[in-house]
Image: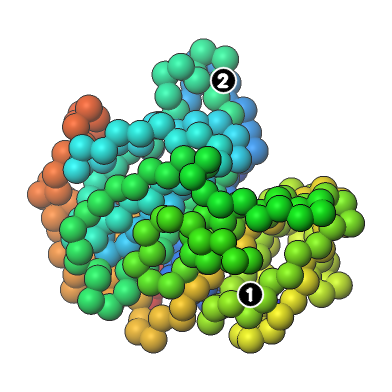
Amino acid sequence: METITPVTHDLGDFKVRRTLPSRPRRMVGPFIFVDQFGPARLPPGKGMDVRPHPHINLATVTYLFEGAIEHRDSIGSHAVIEPGAINLMTAGSGIVHSERSPSAERPNGPALYGMQTWLALPDGKEEIEPAFEHVDGSALPLVEGEGVSARVLMGTLWGKTAGVTEHSQTIYADILLGGGSSIPIDAMTDERAVLVTEGEASLDGDRLEPFTLYVMAPGAAMTLRAETPARVMLLGGEAFSTQRHVFWNFVSSSRDRINQAKEDWKARRFPLVPGDEDEFIPLPEIPLTVTYP
């Protein structure tokens, strides 16, 4: 197995642990960005406020374990995501969005705990029309067995298929295991990885460190086992045959396209976010996100 240790960003009230992109490995299937944030409870009266910012040539996937996030974007979408649901925002040719703690959550101090991932769009689909999809947790299939409850978020796993749009073949699941329980991780796609967010777990007997991304060998059928009650994210999909470049919030197969997006954002040529028009995040000279190449 390939091991990717997270880079931790301490944002004061909460921590963000980033495993992709990394210098050892840029992608696992279409996943080109993997952040795990929290668990945290923000001070009363405060909240998370990610001001409007742009994306191109990717899809963002938001999934929460605790708390709530209010999403607004430049195509007019407005949704509050809560634990168990999934938000899929396809940037395509370009979109702007904001993510904030809902006002109802702020007086007592909002909880914040979950996953933020990006999926690179495949060749021929990078410039598709922007779109937004919210799927409630009740509409996502559960795979249940002795001591195991796995929610299929994207793709087909253990005979169950999520109804969330896939731009390329993708797997994504939230696996809850009781102590001593196990679940098979078959060779169902080109590239697969697991990340433990709670508890103690192992893969074919090898202990998994928390918040670390473990990339499995292609074609290897393995068994995920919990030593204590645990939560493990499974992600992956079809391997990309062409390179992707990353700068800040932009992903593309073309460096020129990223440079154009940078100029468009600086010139304020991206559309505004209805209901959140007054603020924006300026283009950084040196972004916190790892820049490749």
- Point 49% across, 50% down: residue: 116
- Point 61% across, 85% down: residue: 218
Outermost residue, front side? 159
Residue type indicated by callout 1: Val
Give me the disc on residue 44. none
Q: Which residue is mark 2?
A: 109
Q: Earlier in the sequence, mark 1 or mark 2?
A: 2
Res. 48 visible in picture: no
Secondary structure of residue under mark 2: loop
- Give residue 259's quadrant in the image: bottom left
Looking at this view, is 259 or 272 the one in front? 272
Viewed as shown, does residue 200 lie left or right of 41?
A: right
Viewed as shown, does residue 50 lie left or right of 209?
A: left
The vertical placement of 277 against 125, above or below, is: above
Residue 48 in the image: state x and y as whole percent: 46, 31
Secondary structure of residue under mark 1: strand
The vertical placement of 37 against 174, above or below, is: above
- Tag 1 near tag 2, CB within 8 Å: no
- How far apart marks 1 and 2 lie (CA) works out to 36 Å
- Callout in the foreground (1, 2): 1
Query: Callout 2 environment at 10 Å: few (<14), some (14 to 19), or many (20+)?
Result: some
Looking at this view, is 101 or 221 the one in front? 221
- Point 74% across, 76% down: residue: 222
Residue 275 in the image: state x and y as whole percent: 22, 27
Quadrant location of the N terminus?
Answer: bottom right
- Give residue 274's quadrant in the image: top left
Viewed as shown, does residue 230 lie left or right of 38?
A: right
Residue type indicated by callout 2: Gly
Give me the disc on residue 215. 1
Residue 64 in the image: state x and y as whole percent: 55, 41
Quadrant location of the C terminus?
Answer: bottom left
- Point 42% across, 19% down: residue: 103
